[in-house]
Image (tube, helix red, strand yellow):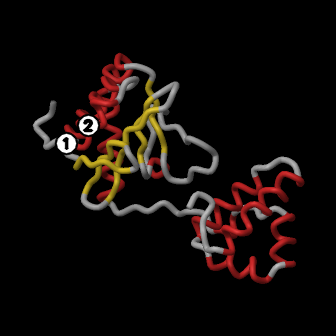
Amino acid sequence: MSERKTNPKIDTVLAREEKWGREFEALRRFALDCGLFEDLKWGCPCYSLGKGNVVLIHGFKEYCAYLFFKGALMTDPDGILVQQTENVQAARQVRFTGLEQIAGMEAVLKDYIHRAIAVEKAGLKVEFKKTADFAMPDEFRDRLAEDPDLSAAFDALTPGRQKAYLLHFSSAKQAKTRETRIDKAAPRILEGKGLDD
């Protein structure tokens, strides 16, 4: 393990990790070797510089990954940064399927961590899309026009909550499904709650 100070919360997470334990240990060491502060956020090992999150380690069924919080602002000379879904604006992943792959990429991964640190030190910010940049399904637009209370409640939501609803509604392919989603969400919107609150 690195000379850097480790966090006992992460020790606990790693001790419970059955599938990606060895991979997480290697990724942890690389982040600590780069001088980042270790903490537990969103249930995952997270590495930061000052108050800025730089990289997070997380595991999935098929792969584990580094998630660079401002990966969209990083250069990617090795072509390894992955946009998790089309709606992810800032973060980018580097995905791994085994310890050997991680070990073979140590120099590259540390270089990418240093690139992410440089982005954080420079104070760069990702320009997020505004709510108006997201498609509003006709069914929801019509519903807001018919219901001034719902319209006012939607306008009062935070931009993040508005975007989540718009993505949820517009991801349905059929009009009937969009209408059903809107019907189910309307009471939550009226209560000032987000999709996942």
Mark 2: amino acid: Thr
Characterize the local packing of mark 2: few (<14), some (14-19) or many (20 or more) Cα atoms within 10 angstroms: few
Q: Looking at the picture, how far across and down is residue 113, in whole percent?
A: 32, 42
Image height of 143 relative to 173, above or below:
below
Image height of 74 relative to 76, above or below:
below
Quarter of the rendering occupied by the C terminus:
bottom right
116 lies left or right of 144: left
Q: Secondary structure at mark 2?
A: helix
Q: Quadrant of residue 141?
A: bottom right
Characterize the local packing of mark 1: few (<14), some (14-19) or many (20 or more) Cα atoms within 10 angstroms: few
Name the disc covering residue 8, or none.
Answer: 1
Image height of 113 relative to 41, above or below:
above
Q: Nearer the viewer, residue 96 or 76?
A: 96
Image height of 74 relative to 15, above or below:
below
| Residue at x 31% of width, y 32% of height | 27
Disc 2 to disc 1: CB gap under 8 Å: yes
Quarter of the rendering occupied by the N terminus:
top left
| Residue at x 10% of width, y 37% of height | 3
| Residue at x 74% of width, y 68% of height | 186
Q: Quadrant of residue 101?
A: top left
Q: Nearer the viewer, residue 70 or 7?
A: 7
Name the disc covering residue 12, or none.
Answer: 2
Cα separation between marks 2 and 1: 6 Å
166 lies left or right of 138: left
Q: Looking at the picture, how far across and down is residue 170, in whole percent?
A: 77, 55
